Image: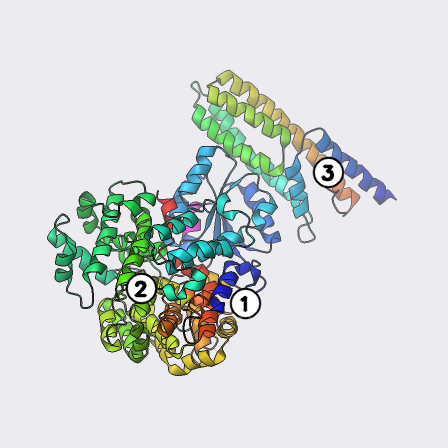
Amino acid sequence: MNLGGHAAKSLSMPSTSVSWKSGDGVSDQFPVGLRVLLVDDDPTCLMILEKMLRNCLYEVTKCNRAEIALSLLRENRNGFDIVISDVHMPDMDGFKLLEHIGLEMDLPVIMMSADDSKNVVMKGVTHGACDYLIKPVRIEALKNIWQHVVRKKKHEWKDFEQSGSMEDGESQAKPSEDVEYSSSANEGNWRNSKRRKDGEDEVEERDDTSALKKPRVVWSVELHQQFVAAVNQLGIDKAVPKKILELMNVPGLTRENVASHLQKYRLYLRRLSGVSQHQNGLNNSFMGPPEATFGSISSLNGLDLQALAATGQLPAQSLATLQAASLGRSTSKSGMSMPLVDQRNLFSFETPKLRFGEGHQQQLSNNSKQMNLFHGIPTTLEPKQLANLHQSAQSFRGMNMQVNAHGSQSSSLLAHMAQPESRTQMGNETNGSQISRLSSTMAQPILTSGISTGVLARNGTVDRVRGAVYNPVSQVTSMVDFSVNQNTDLSGNSFCLGNNPGVSSLSSKGVLQEEVNSKMKGSSGFLPSYDIFNELHQQKSQDWELQNVGLTFDASQHANTQGSLDVPPSVLVHQGFSSGQKSGQNRNTYLGNTMFSAGEESGHRNAPNIGQQLNALLADNSLRGVKTELLPDVSCENALFP
Amino acid sequence: MQGNQLHRQLAHMRQSLFDQGFLDEQFVQLEELQDDANPNFVEEVVTLFYKDSTRLLHNIELSLEKNTLDFTKLDGYMHQFKGSSSSIGAKKVIYECKQFRECCRAGNGEGCKRTFQQLKKEYATLKKKLETYFQFARQAGPTETACPPK
């Protein structure tokens, strides 16, 4: 699909114009208005930097304490695009702050210091900083920080979608960037690629991949908890996939799903117990058995989440959110109340795993139709919320069918998003069954999304679900949050998506992206890419979803969310995804890619253009958000927690 | 004419600050940030710097008076102070900071004290010069700050 490719391009350069797609230009102003959070205890530096950033036409919020910064970020999940922080601060070490942010919000963080010694810079890199600036900082250095935002989103998106494409995407993505890759501690980048390569067989080139999306099981929080319970019951040593599967007794879950998830989990546990390596290590030692940690992990409250995250299914962000949610039980936001430390630790482990999982998953997904279990859904996700989603999903059922029909594809969509390892066979079974399945697995949110996408796919309008792919994942997280916070939205939204009218509109549109864009604008007050990105990025949960959703959503169905992305992004995403899948079994990485890239999936299916556009559109938008959501963006996480 | 003359003088004054090594390129960055919205930006920053760094220097002073010097702590303080100074382009002051840190690393207490005295001198000298400069600038009237040297 041309869209895909096209989308990919546009995606990569959000700044280029916010016009992801065809120039519709979400906002050509990007990076104007980029929301920066500046943290430095030195008032002189703070004043100077603030002025510099203002001169770059960014929106600056400054604070001189790390704690204040964290609370600002927590209160305003989607309020910032990027964080710039000093390394040496009295109340909290800059690296610690970096980790927290990476865990909880997954925002790009730039470190600064007058210290230019290699060790410190290296530390920044390993902790996941996107870049490291040496003081005194010149305004020129600040002018380009937006690239980190884009890159991050892109990566997340890409990861999500598929490993293969990532590399490509990346190169595309930042056209302008100047060696960002190398310069910044963009671990994620190489990681992702790495991950992809390692794990991936799926080669989904983002652009052309769209069809590669593999159905994935979405390991929702509940599902994961069931898994952990089963493993605990059996004993980590004796926990074999077959037995776990039996204990879990989740319809639609295959042994392969469990096996891959188990691998990730083990890896995660190992990581917790101090295994270092990470990323590379993970890939290799996929099977590392973390016995020791196992026990301890189980006891952790947020363990599941972590494990989920570890398995790479849960995007770091999501994980953080989830954990926060579960730990802190804060419905509204993922929980900032949760102990950061815990999360962080978890995440650190996870990240490597995540990545790993990603790759792993992909492999798995290749094989089977796996159910898209919502993976990584925070435990806090209330069942009933899921139920709500479920219902929505059900309604979509018909729609899903289509998506599911694809079987793995659709599942992959969902799965992608949520990073489910094994895609349930969404496609295999009838929609109805699938839905129910999904519901049970807490994949409801996903379902909805998936359904939506499926619907879209049906019409063939949205080929590229790429974006959707991302969303799902993120969605998942967000969904989780959503569920917590607002099930209704989700349900409602998903439904909308499901509606044919919307979908068809998409198809008819042909230019999904445009529509989406326009919608986006309307709905989110679209800020030029920023909003979208922000939304996606930050909120893993709701805003993001909305944004995404809006994108796809609108595209598909104007009616539904006119101007307001009511539909949770996830939903949209799914839509995009599913459509992609559906149409042609685009497995593209729905989540991020499809949505935005639209292009990815596009082409494969029926309404390639639309899908692509949509995807592209979404992808762009969601890049920001999605990326964060997506698990795969492990790079960041890994970096943080080496 | 008078205005022009004043401006010329001002420019000259400014240039000599650079030529004599009191200020470096970073100061120019500050000047470039000054605009209509913040017409006295540079002066404000410098004032803030001096106000804030007083506290830091005082801490260092106290630490140096101890019988046993805690070099790590001193190095930490100086690192902070250096960061601040470099943000306004206080070239000579920065130089002294570096010297001080070297002494800390070498565990050279006497060296630290000596360097610190030198640092304080440079710090005070720059302060006076800049105060004069800003005063003159205000007198000369609004004008675009001299183009950055280099």
- Residue lying at 18% horizontally and 43% vertically, measured from the top left: A292
Q: Nearer the viewer, mark 3 or mark 1?
A: 1
SS for callout 3: loop
Q: Is residue A515 magenta?
A: no
The residue lying furthest to the top in this view is: B110
SS for callout 2: helix
What is the chain identity of the residue bearing mark 1?
Answer: A
Q: What kind of residue is marked 1? A: Val
Q: Nearer the viewer, mark 2 or mark 1?
A: 2
Q: Nearer the viewer, residue A453 or A533?
A: A453
SS for callout 1: loop
- In the rendered image, residue B100, in percent from the top left (x then y), is placed at 53, 24
Question: Residue A117: in sight, yes or no?
Answer: yes
Mark drawn on residue A216: none
Rendered view: B141 above or below B106? below
Question: Residue A482: in sight, yes or no?
Answer: no
- In the rendered image, residue A520, in percent from the top left (x then y), is placed at 49, 71
**Placement of the C terminus of chain B among the 4 image quadrants:** top right
**Placement of the N terminus of chain B among the 4 image quadrants:** top right
Magenta portion: prevailing SS class: helix
* Numbered disc total: 3
What is the chain identity of the residue bearing mark 2?
Answer: A
- Residue B27's quadrant in the figure? top right
Mark drawn on residue B149: 3
- Residue lying at 82% horizontally and 39% vertically, measured from the top left: B8
The region drawn magenta spans: A65-70
- Residue lying at 47% horizontally and 22% vertically, measured from the top left: B105
Q: Nearer the viewer, residue A93 or B118?
A: A93
Residue with the mark numbered 1: A26
Q: What kind of residue is marked 2? A: Ala
Real-space CA distance between mark 2 and mark 1, rounded to the nearest whole angstrom = 28 Å
- In the rendered image, residue A532, in percent from the top left (x then y), is placed at 48, 64
